[in-house]
Image (cartoon, rainbow, N blue to C red):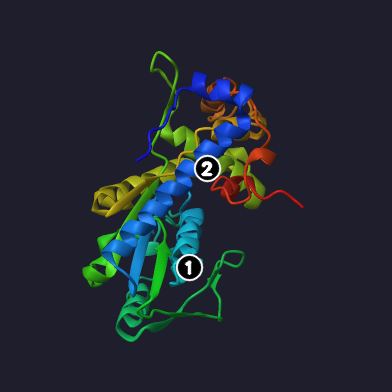
Amino acid sequence: MANINNRFEYINDLAEHEPEQLVADAEKRYVNIVDMAADKILEKAGGGEIVMLAGPSSAGKTTTAKRLKLNFESRGYGVDTISLDDFYLDKGKGPRRPDGTFDLETVHALDLPLIHECLLALLEHGRAEFPQFDFTTGKRMEQTKHVTLGPTDVIVIEGLHALNPIITDTLPHDRLVRLYISLSSRIYNEDMGIVLNKRNMRFVRRLVRDYKFRNSSTENTYCMWDGVLEGEEKYLMPYRDCADIRINSVHIYEPCVFRDEAIGLLEQVGEGSEYFAPAQRLIKALSKFRSLPPALVPESSLLREFLGYEKK
């Protein structure tokens, strides 16, 4: 893995004097790591395989799956990407927590028999019909997605539970490559004190994304966050060491481009809220970074998954 200078003094210095270079270096690092992962996947597999891509919330699974797809296609492979989210049970049919609310983090919120049926059909017969889930209605769509897997094809399946043995143990392991992605670096000050930890940085990504694309208030994002982390600890972390390949998705300049928008959202948390203190701590941390305009972020960047795309 490439070395990362994750001291905030270094980040701020480049953000002030060489912002384009700061962005370019971080983007190049991520692209190189994903491309090296693609090399390892093809060395291990060589076609006719399924890549299981797992990672916690806001790690950048979607963009990484797309980047792998582009890499494989440039080498002449046919590629398709599948999200395990399309296997969610219809709204009202999933398992519940002790308080009666639906548990969307558990692997049992997915239609496990259908997952096994689709993946086995794909591996044994080279074709399968995959479901598509409509999150606006909370139900599976009638229209399916036809997927084929030939000797020069690769399928990338991404989701929180992609490494869970409940899913993978029914499949031939010689046909699978397991990949784990997470934001795996903290940002320190010169005295090695933590300015932003890994969960802080993922939360900021999710905060901005959910406000932009899911109509979620800051309070609502905070309210959901503990459940998200609990689900990761139960259903993802025990299996991350099963991965054949690991990717660190950190972009060290990201606090600079998220800074202003995230602070604005965090300032909406009032003093009477149970989330006021953590919001204030995060505001204090983000305020240490020099602001960079989101326009500096390339259209192909993983951070666009959270920032959105510039209007042309």
For this orientation, the residue located farthest to the right is: 312
- Mark 2 packing: few (<14 Cα in 10 Å), some, or many (20+)? many
Q: Is residue 174 above or below residue 39?
A: below
Q: Is residue 200 left or right of residue 150?
A: right
Residue annotated with mark 1 = 73
Point out the tag, 2 or 1, that comes first from the N-terminus: 2
Residue 242 x %, y %: 24, 54
Asked whether, in this view, residue 71 is left or right of residue 44, the answer is: right
Classify 187 as above or below 163.
above
Query: Dot 1: what SS?
Result: helix
Q: In the structure shown, which secondary structural element does the residue marked by tag 2 occupy?
A: helix
Amino acid under disc 2? Glu
Between 95 and 269, the one nearer to me in the picture: 269
Vertical comparison of 136 with 103: above or below: below
Task: Check disc 2 and report the residue beneath it.
Answer: 27
Residue 64 visible in the snapshot: yes
Rendered location of residue 188, percent (x, y): 43, 22
